[in-house]
Amino acid sequence: MDQNPVLLVTGASRGIGAAVASKAAEQGWTVLVNYVQNESAARSVADQITANGGSSRIVQGDTGTEEGIAAIFAAVDREFGRIDGLVNNAGVVDQTARVDEMSRERLERMFAINVIGKIRCATEAVKRMSTRHGGKGGVIVNISSMAAVLGSAGQYVDYAAAKGAVDTFTIGLSREVAAEGIRVNGIRPGIINTDIHASGGLPERARDLAPTVPMQRTGTAEEVADAVVYLISSRASYVTGAILNVSGGR
């Protein structure tokens, strides 16, 4: 049985999730790299971790479905018998649209993955971490967005609303499990240069919005990952219910 602390990173085959997985492994975590479809990308992340002397596994599972979440946590139980940390990173955007152009199907997908999936993954993690359930404690970091504060008018109001829900969930859960050995915090990335923008139909969005950032540049996935790694570490032992903006001042 692996003696390193075990960290599940959802949506870890690319972008922020991949950067978190790599940096956490450098700090001694055994990382479970979750992916939905792109197994080769997830395996590449895991292989790089191994090449750098770390420990990782890959696990398929769509956090937007109960079946996917069940498969992920079955792998956690089978491979490790415990979980010490969860980075709730998996998320989606959609094509840019006004609210009066959005369909119910779009909203259901958006909230199924970005909100319900995060809550359900945290539910399963708490069942395994909480001292109330016989666990030894742990850490959860929810990846939110500055969109929760800014609203993303004319582009992704539904995404912003979902991230607002993530912020509220982070605060509420942190207070609920603080006495059970679990710390829960959030990260609000700003304009980060990853391919999530292309999936929303705006591949140059990060570049185009860079001048709106007080620091006059986009952020990197690695800069977000550094903040996540701090929050899951013992250096943040008295930090819970916090939401850290990693946004260049935006």
Image (cartoon, grey):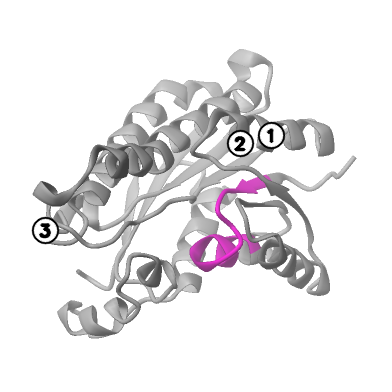
Magenta part of the chain: 7-21
Residue 148, image x, y percentages: 22, 50
Labels 1 & 2 near each other (Cβ < 8 A) = yes
Q: Is residue 5 left or right of residue 250?
A: right
Whether residue 185 is visible: yes
Whichever of labels 3 and 1 marks the residue nearer the N terminus, that label is 1
Residue located 34% across and 56% down the image: 93
The alpha-carbon separation of the residues under discs 3 and 1 comes to 36 Å
Q: Identify the mark nearer the N-term, 2 or 3.
A: 2
Q: Quadrant of the N terminus?
A: top right
Q: Which residue is mark 2?
A: 68
- Give the numbered dot on residue 153: 3
Q: Is residue 45 left or right of residue 192?
A: right
- The amino acid type found where label 3 is placed reads Ala
Residue at numbered disc 1: 71
Camera-side residue: 218 or 34?
34
The kind of secondary structure element at disc 1 is helix
81 to 39, vertically: above or below: above
- The three-letter code of the residue at mark 2 reads Gly
